[in-house]
Amino acid sequence: MLSKSDIKHIANLSRISITPEEEEEFSRSISFILDYVSRLEQLDGGIESGFVDLADNSDIFRDDESGVGLSEPAYNLTDAAPETKNGYVKVKRILQ
Amino acid sequence: MDLFNLTIKKAHNLLVGKKVSSAEITRHFLDVIKKKDGDIRAFLAITEKLAMKQAKKVDDKIAKKENIGLLEGVPCAVKDNILIKNEKCTAGSKILENYVASYDATVIKKLKNNGVVALGKTNLDEFAMGSSTENSAFGPTKNPCDLTRVPGGSSGGSAAAVAADECIFALGSDTGGSVRQPAAFCGAVGLKPTYGSVSRYGLIAMASSLDVIGPITKTVEDAEIIFNAIKGKDKLDSTTIESNLSIFPPEADQPLAGNFQFSKNLKIGVPKEYFIEGMDRGVEECVRKVVDKLGKNKNIEIKEVSLPHTQYALAVYYILMPAEVSANLARYDGIRYGKSASAKNKSLLDFYLDTRGKYLGFEARRRIMLGSYVLSEGHFDDYYQKAGNVSGLIKEDFRNVFREVDLIVAPTTPNTAFKIGEKAKDPMQMYLSDIFTVASNIAGIPAMSVPCGFAGKMPVGLQVIGPWSGEDKIFALGKIIELLV
């Protein structure tokens, strides 16, 4: 069972705020799900490369040529940002 | 002119025969939506302007006596996690409530090139996380067969729109059953194609190693037509694969994916692990009845098979999927797009916490946190690594069975559509509705739900599961099943 402080820690790692009432519900339900998935422990081994052969297993690079990127002007993208200034996305100061 | 229950070919023939114009067909569906959708709420947005513009283009072509392709002027609905340029795309989330797509998804580009008309965007569980469409930030969709029941999810809006005849076909996305389960619940056909056969470019990502876009339709033939129109390698999605079948763009007189012919003997496997205790007896009876009828066909051999790791599939899924969710949803930081909390007098960290806490729903946050946990230091080997290893065993199960049989048939879901609110408080109960569908996503193989009767008055779906890139086989059997039901 995950404690409330575990939940607070995970929420913080996930960059999510949760209310005190939600802490309880998250703690209960996430513990329950983890308990369900722990049935995998019954199985020994498995196949090591299990999840890497989903598709082509090699690195894929695009051709080294120009014009493959976005063909639209940049403002189509910057317009989607909640705050912009002079065509740039405005962000908060990182270094205080 | 009766425009109800139109399939793609019926609509095409009406257009070619000049019985009706593309604008009239489009207007018909917009009217049906206006009339019915207040109750069903399949649509989050109607793209009327775009639809009428697309219809006019087709009518202009017909007026000039130009030939039109099979899909030209055919109206469709699009799940609201697939981008259509200059239209809103919310993914059912508050955090993207105002987001307007700046480009077309590859599947949309392909459909546009084929002349398809887009009627609107359909409701879904937030970021496609759910099995009932109740997790949408914009309210639940109702099942057209019974408005007190859920349409399934996460592509519940798309399935409901098809079932309510509000469009000819719809696009959904399937990460753990999100096309097949709602199709089963609403009585529609739903195809989850082979992983990588359809480009994910422009699909709002949930779990990238499992996500695939697929059609929800009224008939197997329509699913085949749409699959063939949207599939193919795409340099904008490096996980796409070259498809061995190429009939794009589809033409009306072309035999569709006719590559697969029944040989003398078609072997169908029925996995014993897909008939479990606690499943709806009506569902089991419907599926068994179809299996028995298939068995009477001289050219079909039914064989019981075993997929021994089936019982671990859902556990694998609830590790791999949230792990990928936690990474994919990190981009909703309130800075680059979507909604953001007030930034005044706050540190950057508090700004992130507030934005994501306020605008991401409960289920989305639960899965992000679950993902962060299984990927965190000290837990990675126990969860993510272990799930990856077991996913290899699940794939091996299918590889072994497909050495013995051509296709697998099984129920799509253990139960029919449940009541709205019935499972909302118990996440594990909700997750269990995907117990028969998740294994195909983990293995990356194609599977299609086909209506196979009713339990009570609710539709039941039968799932045809095929080997990698075996869609042509699935369609062939699907068409036989349609005739038997």
Image: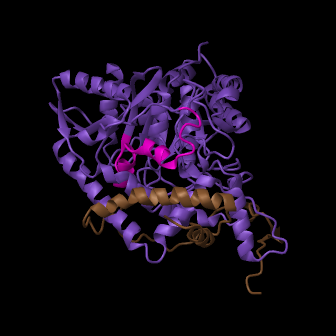
Residue B231: percent from left, percent from top? 44, 47
Q: Residue shown at 40%/37% (left/top)?
A: B413
Q: Is residue B425 above or below residue B14?
A: below
Is B164 or B351 nearer to us in this picture?
Answer: B351
Position of B322 with respect to B453 (left or right) is right
Residue A23: percent from left, percent from top? 63, 62
Q: Is residue B157 above or below residue B386?
A: above
The residue most toward the top is B1
Tint of chain A: brown
Which residues lie in the magenta part? B419-447
Position of B111 with respect to B139 (left or right) is left
Position of A72 with respect to B215 (left or right) is right
Q: How many marks?
A: 0
Q: Residue shown at 20%/25% (left/top)?
A: B295
Quarter of the image where the C terminus of chain B is located: top left
Tint of chain B: purple
Quarter of the image where the N terminus of chain B is located: top right
Residue B59: percent from left, percent from top? 65, 28
Is B56 or B284 nearer to us in this picture?
Answer: B284
